[in-house]
Image (cartoon, helix red, strand yellow):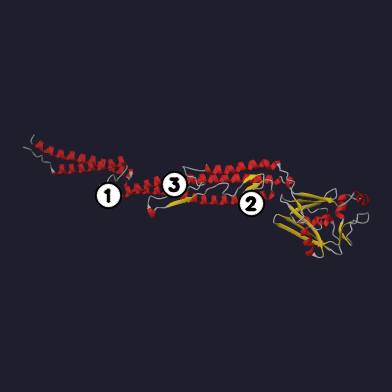
Amino acid sequence: MASNTILSSGIRNNLLTLQQTTAQQSVIQNRLATGKKVNSAIDNPVNYFTSASLNDRANQLTGLLDGISNGVQTIQAASKGIDGVTKLVQSLQSTIKQAQADAAQNRPTKAGTALATATEAAVANKSLKDIALDKKIASADAVADPATASSPGDIGLNTSTSPVAAISITVGTTTYTASFNNANATIRDVVNEINKSGLVTAFVDEKGQLNIKGNGSEPVDFGFGVGADATAATTAAGTGTGNTAIGFSALDAAVATTTITSSNVTSAVRSNLIDQYNTLRDQIDDLAKDSSFNGINLLQGDRLSIVFNEKTGNNQTRLDIQGSTLSAQNLGIDQAINTQLAGFVNFQNDLDLEKASAALTGALSSLKSLASTFGSNLSVAQTRQDFTKELVNTLKTGGDNLVLADPNEEGASLLALNTRQQLSQTALSLANQAEQGVLRLFG
């Protein structure tokens, strides 16, 4: 038969207080051990589940950071590729400039027959060059007069029937015409009018010959003529009826103008530059193909998608970047060769070199525009990367604030409970001593 031990009211109250203190010590010791004041839904269901939700989102965003980082590196790889291609295009420009500098051998040049003779030089006591430059182009009759000590002479055109002279110069699709009064005009005036065209250069050499040299490598059609007025003279120059008077003959029977072509000398310097140019051009394609990161190449037309949040569907935020296929051909940079062929750059032709130079300038503009686009996208991606990192930190901090314990506060509470426990134990001991005093009455 079980027996019940009867405790006095004082002992029982002290014992209950001691039990409560021990229980509170256990809770605080658990908080200090785990670092959390809310370890389960039982402790605080609202804080527990809110913290869990915030930490879950933080973990999801942390997972997205890897994708954002890869996206940033992919854009940077493409940007570095554009920088490299830009340097190659600039090297191509340098090659073109070297080819243009080596132009003298390929200029169309023609020298007319001498406009002065040794007999005139002896009589006038001047050089053949000076005699030719000083000769008038017309006189009162159509008979050429030689230079003398007192007269510059003339080339035999009649001022009475043809008082106006004109020149006509055609290079490619560009034609230059000019007319002037020939009453007192000299060969020097003709040279000056020709030089005003900007298409060719004229000069009289030491042999007394009028020379015409193209400023480019395109063939030159040159005509000289005289007439009753500017219109008639220009028409005559267009058919070159006066060419023979200034030492040039008509090479084309159908069109009386003198056609001046290059000597067809292939410049060795330009030929050597062709290989250099084409090698640089090929490197553009190779460099663009190597500008990939993690299997995505924005310079080869690949598409990049960077996801910024953990949601799906219409609520998902992302950055989609469509790449471009970067190649020398797409930039308008043609291959260089040594002959005239459509779709290629003839390094022996100045006009082709000018077109190639313009194409390279356009290519640099296209690269600058593409670099600007990628730079803008990179800025967006990096901004979202930094924002996501900060948001993850905010979410984790907010979640922790709901469940983490304050060690200072919990330590102070534990110290207080330890003190209370000692006091409770002392009170319990005193209560027991009071009961033991009753036993001494029976001693």
Dot 1 or dot 3: first in sequence order is: 1
Name which residue lies at 78% across and 49% down: 110
Mark 2 sits on what residue?
A: 358
> Would residue 177 be visible to someone looking at this image?
yes
Q: CA distance from mark 1 to mark 3?
A: 35 Å
Q: Earlier in the sequence, mark 2 or mark 1?
A: 1
Name the mark on residue 45.
1
Q: Which quadrant is the N terminus positioned in?
A: top left
Q: Secondary structure at mark 1?
A: helix
> Residues under labels 2 and 3: Cα distance?
39 Å
Q: Secondary structure at mark 2?
A: helix
Question: What's the amino acid at mark 1?
Answer: Pro
**Left or right of 322: which side holds 103?**
right
Q: Position of 65 compared to 370: left or right? A: left
Q: Which residue is mark 3?
A: 68
- Foreground of the two, 424 or 119: 119
Q: Nearer the viewer, residue 278 or 367?
A: 278
Measuring from the top left, give residue 369's x and y in whole percent.
Answer: 55, 52
Q: For this rendering, which residue is in front, 78 or 23?
A: 78
The spot of residue 198 in percent (x, y) is 74, 55
Check residue 200 in the rendering and tell me which mark sits there, or answer none: none
Q: Amino acid at mark 3?
A: Ile
User: From the viewer's perspective, is the residue at label 2 or at label 1 nearer?
Assistant: 2
The reply to whether callout 1 and callout 3 are in contact (CB within 8 Å) is no
Q: Point out the residue furthest to the top here.
A: 443
The picture places residue 118, in percent across and down from the top left corner, at 90, 48
Q: Nearer the viewer, mark 1 or mark 3?
A: 3
In the displayed orientation, state which residue is furthest to the front.
Answer: 253
Question: Residue at position x 46%, y 46% from top?
Answer: 71
Task: Classify mark 3: helix, strand or loop.
Answer: helix
Please identify the quarter of the rendering in which residue 438 is found.
Answer: top left
